[in-house]
């Protein structure tokens, strides 16, 4: 499977851990950094050689490698990521929903929607992705740009690569970051989450190189401060991941008390995020769901394939999910994240 989304690659680290550090003296050594040992410096030299072999200019390699330090805080955050047992009971969805589908995100999302009204039809026609979904991603990732992270990206990526737990991933992202520099992205924008994501949509460097868009035609792909570029880039990500135009992410559903769930266990073995995918049922047509007494509370044609999820258990809220829900999971492989994106998008669109 092609590595499209940061969470597909990084676990739940990126959007859950946008821990800011002071913006002053950003590149200087702090209490979180260790004196550069010979092993780290030798590895940085290897990274530089790999970057030059990948086409990065010698000047950029020198500029970005000369003052790197091993960041102990980044390593601690990476190693603190929880390992969730397949048998562990998931936490309640309702508190997560309340925190992410909140009045502030709804109001601000609607305001940006109104401000961008003249551009939105162009985006939706070009990419086939609803503006409400685009804005919901932006709102969930960085609260529309309020919280983008304050870690120095070259230091973080070099540290994570050297640490070795996911060396190939982070070495590749470090080289991609240097390619961004060669393309003209200024050094002061190389700031983001401890795990390497940045900008309004929290893209990794490799994702930026492949999918970031110039949404206003000014020749720059500015996903840090430009609304049009941010929205076009998120839309392009979703189009690349297989979003189907005209199909909702899902709808709320009425579920009868006597539904036999033992016959609905999913049979597909997902190659990634198995626990996330295992929480929904197998796929049936909406017509088949209706025959079982499960009634969609929104417009879904009878031929649509859908899966049922009851995130807080039997007798609580239930949703029929479409293939576009799986596209949201490509961005962040978490059911609670994907549900919140869909629900916030629905509120923004009202």
Image (cartoon, rainbow, N blue to C red):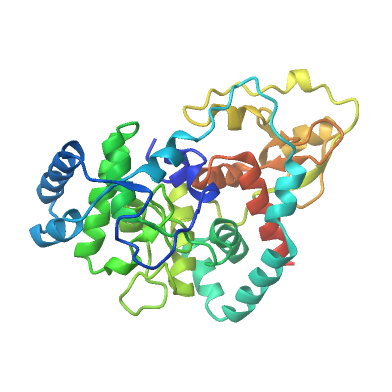
Q: Is residue 168 left or right of residue 79?
A: left
Q: In this orientation, does residue 224 appear?
A: yes
Q: Looking at the rendering, which quadrant does residue 277 occupy? A: top right
- Seen from the viewer's position, the closer of residues 178 and 288 is 178
Seen at 70% across and 47% down, the residue is: 96
Placement of 24 over or under 336, stated as above or below = below
Percent of width and height locating residue 72: 36, 42
In the rendered image, which quarter contains the C terminus?
bottom right
Q: Quadrant of the N terminus?
A: top left
> In the rendered view, does 285 fall on the left or right side of 212?
right
Q: Is residue 248 visible?
A: no
184 displayed left or right of 83: left
| Residue at point 52%, 41% (across, down) | 12
Q: How many marks?
A: 0
Relative height, residue 311 to residue 95 (above, below): above
Left or right of 317? Residue 283 is: left
Find residue 132 and report its image quarter: bottom right
């Amino acid at each position: 499977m092609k590595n499209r989304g940061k969470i597909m690659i990084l676990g739940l680290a990126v959007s859950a851990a946008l821990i800011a550090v002071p913006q002053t003296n950003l590149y200087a050594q702090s209490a979180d950094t260790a004196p550069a040992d010979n092993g780290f410096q030798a590895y940085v030299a290897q990274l530089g050689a790999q970057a030059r072999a990948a086409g990065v200019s010698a000047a950029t390699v020198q500029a970005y490698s000369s003052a790197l330090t091993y960041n102990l805080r980044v390593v601690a955050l990476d190693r603190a990521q929880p390992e969730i047992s397949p048998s562990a009971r998931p936490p309640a969805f309702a508190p997560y929903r309340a925190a992410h589908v909140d009045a502030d995100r709804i109001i601000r999302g609607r305001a940006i929607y109104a401000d961008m009204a003249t551009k939105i039809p162009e985006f939706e026609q070009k990419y086939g992705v609803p503006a409400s979904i685009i804005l919901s991603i932006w709102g969930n990732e960085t609260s529309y740009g309020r919280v983008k992270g304050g870690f120095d990206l070259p230091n973080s990526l070099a540290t994570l690569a050297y640490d070795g737990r996911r060396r190939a991933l982070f070495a590749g992202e470090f080289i991609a970051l240097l390619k961004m520099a060669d393309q003209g992205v200024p050094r002061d924008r190389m700031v983001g989450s401890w795990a390497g994501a940045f900008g309004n949509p929290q893209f990794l460097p490799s994702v930026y190189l492949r999918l970031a868009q110039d949404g206003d035609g000014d020749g720059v792909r500015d996903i840090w401060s430009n609304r049009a570029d941010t929205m076009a880039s998120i839309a392009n990500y979703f189009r690349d991941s297989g979003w189907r135009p005209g199909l909702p992410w899902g709808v709320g559903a009425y579920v009868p008390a006597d539904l036999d769930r033992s016959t609905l266990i999913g049979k597909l073995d997902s190659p990634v995020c198995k626990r996330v995918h295992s929480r929904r049922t197998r796929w049936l047509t909406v017509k088949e769901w209706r025959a079982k007494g499960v009634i969609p509370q929104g417009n879904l044609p009878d031929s649509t394939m859908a899966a049922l999820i009851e995130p807080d258990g039997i007798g609580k809220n239930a949703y029929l999910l479409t293939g576009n829900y799986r596209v949201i999971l490509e961005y962040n492989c978490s059911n609670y994240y994907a549900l919140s994106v869909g629900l916030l998008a629905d509120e923004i669109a009202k």
